[in-house]
Image (spheres, helix red, strand yellow):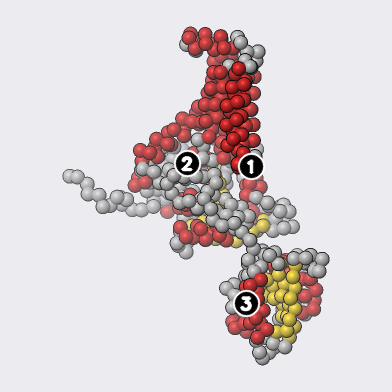
């Protein structure tokens, strides 16, 4: 099929398409044969993917009413087919890919190849509010499974011809439509070329989701942290483009990926920039506090109570020992088990139907926690610490980062239970070493902090919008400066 061409006469081309589309075995594969200006013609499309109304109004009716003859390619393109996008092709593989994307193929006797008409009309989900990246201030639109609609949502925000949408495909047997989006002149050409190279080197039958594509493209598949930042919000995707990053869109994926990414971008919420400076700075600090508590509190508790009891106040140590004397399970295995149970409850709440998710979380947290405490299986203090660390993980705006945090949390508890402070610090040191060497599309994931590079000051802490005059380090060096001069140019400086 890859080498077959739609040449050699009308009958051969017609039979090639019929065989490739498995007509008449495949029920939704449709062929409509008719006479066009005295010669034979055939229209091929898939029922449900193509709009029957557009086919009837913009292809069949003009062709059936046309007089004279015989038709030529110029006549068909310039006079007969009032469709927004019509292009000829002689490649069978290209024709089939477009047919099963919703286009229609028109074969005409005496004309080599097929005319591909854009008459897409498949069912798709409309634009709704974001499901995971909810905000208080800011737009309430989210990407959908239609890649074309996602590009339109971006172009509504960024009304410039410099926004390039470069079509590509991935998948050897069933090609999936992929699109690279970047700002011409701002995104680095080497990053764009590297993504093209990696997409061209993906050898897989079919890519079903953006997460699967991420696994095929990332630098370190076994790393704990993600190397692409994913968003379902057009406004956040636009901010990535303005920072010099390249977006990757996939058909049937309601998110877009951005690369290269910085670790600190995973801590940024979509409405950080929409909030005034005091509010945004307070929430950013609160988020960092939650991450610290979630990551270190369980491991510190295990290390202190198991190996370094001298570091606890006497009253707290007495309380811990009295509570522990009533339970049969030691603190280390109890902490590790409770963290696993908390993750189990969270995963169950995610997978059950939406109408039951909230009830399941409340019932599991209250009834199960109370029953465990009353049965003297674990101490109430441990339940409080596990709940506190769980709340800290919920403040993260990125789902992949929250999963990485849970795994790191368990590893730290395991290291603290085996080696106390020494094991915990050693585990943290190994995490930092691995993080320092991790890259995203060949760029250090800790940049622009390590190595130090020119950057937008809004990184770890929230900075005022009028101080953010630089783009991200991923932008071209000559485009790092967003604006020249003060951003609050109206403000008169006091003498």
Position of residue 30 relative to residue 305, above or below, is below
Q: Are marks 1 and 2 in contact (CB under 8 Å)?
A: no
Where residue 12 appears, as percent x and y from the top left, is 80, 76
Q: Is residue 197 visible?
A: no
Where residue 154 appears, as percent x and y from the top left, is 50, 57
Where residue 61 appears, as percent x and y from the top left, is 65, 81
Position of residue 251 relative to residue 69, above or below, is above
Instruction: Determine the residue positioned at 61% across, 10% down.
Output: 326
Q: Are marks 1 and 3 in contact (CB under 8 Å)?
A: no
Q: Is residue 206 visible?
A: yes
Disc 1: CA contacts within 10 A as few (<14), some (14-19) or many (>=20): few
Give the quarter of the figure containing the N terminus: bottom right
Tag 1 residue: 353
The residue sitting at the left extreme is: 495
Position of residue 2 relative to residue 450, above or below, is below
Disc 3: CA contacts within 10 A as few (<14), some (14-19) or many (>=20): some
Q: Secondary structure at mark 3?
A: helix
- Compare marks 1 and 3 and give the one earlier in the sequence: 3
Instruction: Determine the residue positioned at 63% across, 55% down.
Output: 252
Q: What is the CA distance from the residue labelled 1 to the residue labelled 3?
A: 43 Å
- Compare marks 3 and 2 and give the one earlier in the sequence: 3
* In-image side of 377 versus 393 (left or right): right
Instruction: Determine the residue positioned at 44% across, 40% down.
Output: 459
Give the quarter of the figure containing the C terminus: top left
Eye-nearest disc, 3 or 2: 3
Q: Secondary structure at mark 1?
A: loop
Eye-nearest disc, 1 or 2: 1
Q: Which mark is residue 268?
A: 2
Eye-nearest disc, 1 or 3: 1
Tag 3 residue: 57
Please name whichever residue, 362 or 453, is drawn nearer the observer in this view of the structure: 362
């Amino acid at each position: 099929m890859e080498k077959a061409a739609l040449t050699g006469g009308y009958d051969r081309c017609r039979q090639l398409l019929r065989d490739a589309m498995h007509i008449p075995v495949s029920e939704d594969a449709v062929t409509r044969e008719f006479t066009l200006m005295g010669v034979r013609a055939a229209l091929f499309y898939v029922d449900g993917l193509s709009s029957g109304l557009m086919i009837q109004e913009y292809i069949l009716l003009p062709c059936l009413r046309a007089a004279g003859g015989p038709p030529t390619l110029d006549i068909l393109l310039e006079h007969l087919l009032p469709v927004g996008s019509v292009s000829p092709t002689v490649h069978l593989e290209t024709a089939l890919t477009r047919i099963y994307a919703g286009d229609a193929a028109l074969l005409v006797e005496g004309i080599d190849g097929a005319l591909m008409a854009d008459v897409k009309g498949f069912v798709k989900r409309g634009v709704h509010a974001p499901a995971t990246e909810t905000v208080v201030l800011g737009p309430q639109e989210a990407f959908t499974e239609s890649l074309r609609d996602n590009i339109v949502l971006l172009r509504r925000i960024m009304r410039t011809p410099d926004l390039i949408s470069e079509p590509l495909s991935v998948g050897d047997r069933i090609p999936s439509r992929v699109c690279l989006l970047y700002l011409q002149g701002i995104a680095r050409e080497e990053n764009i070329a590297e993504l093209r190279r990696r997409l061209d080197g993906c050898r897989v039958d079919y890519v079903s989701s953006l997460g699967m594509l991420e696994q095929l493209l990332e630098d370190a598949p076994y790393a704990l942290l993600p190397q692409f930042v994913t968003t379902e919000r057009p406004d956040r995707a636009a901010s990535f483009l303005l920072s010099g990053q390249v977006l990757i869109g996939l058909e049937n994926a309601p998110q877009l990926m951005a690369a290269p990414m910085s670790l600190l971008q995973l801590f940024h919420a979509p409405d950080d920039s929409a909030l005034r400076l005091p509010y945004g700075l307070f929430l950013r600090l609160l988020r960092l506090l939650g991450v610290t508590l979630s990551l270190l509190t369980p491991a510190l508790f295990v290390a202190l109570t198991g190996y370094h009891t001298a570091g606890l106040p006497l009253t707290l140590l007495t309380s811990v020992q009295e509570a522990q004397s009533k339970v049969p399970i030691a603190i280390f295995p109890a902490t590790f088990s409770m963290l696993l149970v908390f993750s189990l409850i969270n995963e169950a709440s995610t997978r059950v139907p939406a109408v039951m998710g909230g009830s399941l979380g409340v019932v599991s947290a209250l009834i199960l926690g109370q029953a465990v405490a009353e049965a003297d299986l674990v101490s109430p203090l441990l339940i409080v610490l596990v709940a506190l660390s769980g709340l800290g993980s919920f403040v993260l705006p990125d789902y992949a980062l929250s999963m990485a945090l849970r795994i790191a949390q368990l590893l730290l508890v395991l290291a603290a239970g085996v080696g106390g402070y020494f094991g915990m610090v050693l585990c943290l040191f190994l995490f930092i070493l691995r993080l320092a060497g991790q890259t995203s599309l060949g760029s250090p994931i800790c940049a622009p902090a390590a190595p130090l590079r020119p950057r937008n000051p809004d990184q770890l802490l929230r900075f005022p919008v009028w101080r953010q005059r630089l783009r991200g380090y991923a932008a071209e060096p000559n485009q790092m400066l967003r604006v020249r001069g003060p951003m609050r140019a109206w403000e008169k400086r006091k003498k």
